[in-house]
Each structure stands twice: as structure tokens, then as C-alpha cells.
Amino acid sequence: MLRLTTFGGVALRRDGELHTGAASQKRRLALLVLLAAAEGRPVRRDQLLAALWPESDGDHARHALRQALHAIQRALETDALFVGTDALELDPAVVTSDVQDFDRAESEQAHERMIGLYKGPFLEGFHVNDAPEFERWAETQRARRVTTYIAALESCAQRAETRSDHTAAVAWWRKLAAEEPLRAVPVLGVMRSLAALGDVTAALHFASVHEATVREELGVAPEPAVTALASKLRNGGGGGGGRGVDTLATAVSSETRAPASRLAQSRSRARDRQREWVEHTLGSRLLFDAGVMPSGSDVALPAFDRERRISVSVHLLDPGVAALADIELLLSRLDRVASLRDPHIVPLLECGHADGVVYYVTARPAGESLRQRLARERQLPIDDALAIAEGVAAALSHAHAAGVLHADLRPKHTFVANEGTSLDALGIAEALGAAMSHTRTSAALRMGSPAYQSPEQLTGTQGGALDPRSDIYSLGCMLYEMLAGEVPFASVSPGQAVSAKLTGTAASLRGRRDTVSEELDRVVLRCLARSPSDRFRGADELCAALRAVRP
């Protein structure tokens, strides 16, 4: 029996064994996926031709399709895989697929079965070159199915809460919150269910983490319902028979609190060991300051490099991440970043690994971050915004030419000084994504801000599968914010911002700031196109467009 899996990646198996032969060639796999995901309807041959062989003329495309069908059946040693002539479908007696099972479970409203089938975004990391129609179709399918999966999670959580199974409700709501960390509904569900179990302390902690995440990622306050429920719980309401926070905190068993406490202590000890190691190993040439700066998946120790005579930051990779990462691949990617030399790029000076510690050293950026300036001014003068965007585009142009993506472009990594604009953390997220891609645990490593990430990043595309147009999208978000005073889609609730980015179109800048020219508006909206094919092809092209619209 053949089994095609499409969630969390694409694979074809025969009797449980992975097929790596001719049928697993990308375009042929894409053909099988198109038929499997057709929701029980045959797919016309002309639709397959348009999706997979758009550049070929009619005769060549039809010949390519016939060849592909023949090659797949020959490789799988069956002549009964496909049913139909003008329109094709897969024979369910010969091949099954998770996407067909998922769609069937959806039609039967078997939500737990749907959740069990969903192993990650539809066609995660799977791309077919020179097939833009297939890519657009895949993006639409990916967005639809993640929406359906999220709705199934929410339904399971609501049903558990309705029947007062608060332990199950917490599990479902937490799972939903992991998928939609910026949305208020799952956070409120977790808080209600934890409070009903008597753990108000955990409910308040969950609310505070959510608030910090929303402020960091979207630059806005959480929805009022979250803060209102947190206030009610602090004042002794909202569950637990009216007991106050102090009473309920005492009621939480030491066994419940101990694992989290032990984890925090273990992490603290690991950080201390890391710092001791770095200070012992690099202390002969680095003079360390007392401070520690959190920096996503690492912490940064400020120091002064005696040899280079500059201020630097020594970044220590989180021990948990370091334990899972492919260190050799990570250091190889970081070495490539270290080779970049451009006045618009904050240089990565060195990297290393020993005794379980992974570190890299960067120069300290000059000036203030764009995030600090936007917090002070909100909207920037148009000429300043364009100058900053040109500096960022210049840095991206140099990096992209060397095969390096930023992959975490946002205002906190953009620095503005009298000498110009410079980019920090360039290539770090890409290197970490590549080093973690060998394990499913990498899903726990959440890097970047959804407010600035491209749709292909949000839907699960990882590491090397991204291309420079993803950075172009992120730069478009930054330029939009500099001109409008808010990121694209900020007008919707935090929980809807991500889905709006996947399905909607950014509003015109001219509706928010009438001094923005129509030409500049078009440039920004082209950066923000949902499909990479509709954006600027590269940073050089964007640079030219920005110069053309300068006042």
C-alpha cells in the first residue's frame, strides 16, 4: 500500500518504507500532491499542465505530463495508480494520503482525528522551481488547512471546557496558544481553565508572558479582555470558589511548582557555567562588562576587545538549543556570515565551540536602534525613512550576493547613526534554522517577529527554502511602519494579525498619510505582496525603486 504524507513535509512511502526513487522527484511528487489534495474531485489535465509546466508549449507540456504519469507508475510498479483520462484522480485502493484523511475528518467534524493527522504546515519546506502557479496554490492550501486545524483545536478546547474537564481544556488551549501566541482567545481559555483548577498563579503568569510577547512582537498592548481577566483574578475572582491569589497560590502543590523551579535553576546554572567558560577562555583579550543582554535564542555579554580596540557583544547560544543543533553546520553558516564586509552590516567577528558552549562575537552597533527611534517619533520624515530603507537594502544586497539571508529583519536589529544605517544579527536566524532543521524539536525554536515575517515564514518554510524575497517583505513591513506609524495589519486584533497577513492585502499608505506619493505607495505594497513572485526580485531592484521615489 502506498501512503503520501503532506503535513510537515512531503514523503511517499510503500508499506511503511520511504520511497526515494523516480516517483519522488519533486515535480512528480507535486503532481501526486495536487491530485491528493483535490478534496475528492478529479483534476483536469490542463490544470495540471498550468500548475507544473507553465513555461512549456502545449505539446511539450502534455508530453511531460504523460512521461511523469508513466514514470511514477513504473517506479511504483503499478498501472492502477491513476483513474480517469481527461481528468485524473488517485485510486484510493492503491494510494492513501494524510491530506485526504484530514479532509474526510473535516467533513465528518472529527476534530481530534484532524489534529492527530496534522504534523506541521501543509507542504512545509517543499518547493518546485519555475512553477509559480503551484507555489500560489500551495500557499492557499497551506493557509486554509492551518486555519481548519486551528478551528479544530479551538472546538476541542471549548467542548472540554463546557463539560468542565478543565485539565483537558488547559491542554487544548495551550496547544492552540502555541500555534497562535498573539491571539487572545486561547490565552483567555488557558487562564479560565487554570483558575478553575485552582492555579491562579499559573494563569496570571501565562497572561504576563502573553502581554510581553504581544508588546515585543506587535508593538501594541494585549486585548482588553486579557488584562481585565488578569485583574479579576488578582482580586480573587474568576474561579477557584472565590479564593484570593495568596490562598490559591498556597493551594498549588509543591510537586506542581517544583519542575518549573528546577528547570529555571538548571538554566541559571548552565548560564553561569557558560559565562565562566567564556571569561576564562576569552578573558585574556576581552574585558567583560557586568551586564547581560537577552537576545532571542542566546544571551549577549557586553565586552571590550583589547586587540581590535572596539566594543563587542559575546553571544552565548542557549544550552538547550546548542544540545540539539548540528554544531558543525551552524559554525559553517556563521563562518559564511563572518566573511561579509559592508559598511551597512554589523560584522560578525568570530565564532567557536568547546565544552558544550557555542559562542559568536559581533561588533557593538553604532547609534540607536530603529525600534528606539520609532518609539520616540512613531512616524519618520519621508526622506529619513527612505534613507534608512536604502541602507537596509544595500546591506541585504551585499548579503544576498554571498548567499546569506537575514531571516529576522525588524527594527530592533536596524541601527541608525550619523554614519548611516547598519544591520545587526544578519544571517543568525538562517544559520540557526539550518542547524536545527534535522530534528522535529526545531519547531520549539521560535525566532523572529510575526509582525515583520513574510507569509512563507509564517506558514512554516524553514532555513534554506526561503529566498531573498522574504527579506524584501520584512523590509517592506519596516518601511510601512516608518511611514504609517504602525506595521501592516496592526488595525486588526493581535490574534488576527497573522491570519490577515496570510489572506489579506496591506492597506494603502496614502489612507494613513496623504503626503506619501502614489509611486512610493506602490513600491511599499509591492514589497508586501503575499506571493514572492509579485515582489521585487532582489535588493538591488528595490534600491533603484527607492531612489526613484526620493523627494
Image (cartoon, grey):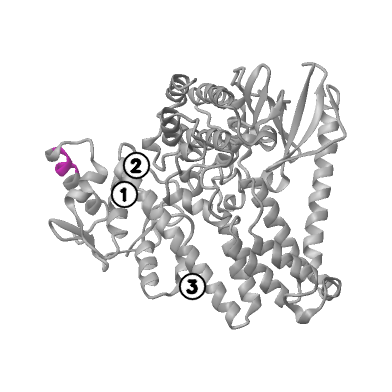
Q: How crowded is mark 1: few (under 14 residues within 10 Å), some or many (20 or more)?
A: many
Where does residue 6 sit, x and y in percent of width and height?
A: 40, 56
Where does residue 230 sit, x and y in percent of width and height?
A: 73, 65
Find numbered disc 1 in the image and state the secondary structure of the residue it sits on.
helix
Q: Which residues, given as a range, are shown in magenta?
A: 60-64
The structure residue drawn at horizontal position 53% and vertical position 29%, both measured from the top left corner, is: 404
Which residue is identified by label 3? 112
Where does residue 370 sit, x and y in percent of width and height?
A: 65, 31
In screen coordinates, is 7 left or right of 357? Answer: left
Which residue is identified by label 1? 30
Q: Earlier in the sequence, mark 2 or mark 3?
A: 3
In space, the residues marked 2 and 3 are separated at their CA atoms by 32 Å
- Labels 2 and 1 touching (C-beta < 8 A): yes
Magenta residue check for 505: no
Please identify the dominant SS of the magenta region: helix
The structure residue drawn at horizontal position 60% and vertical position 65%, both measured from the top left corner, is: 186
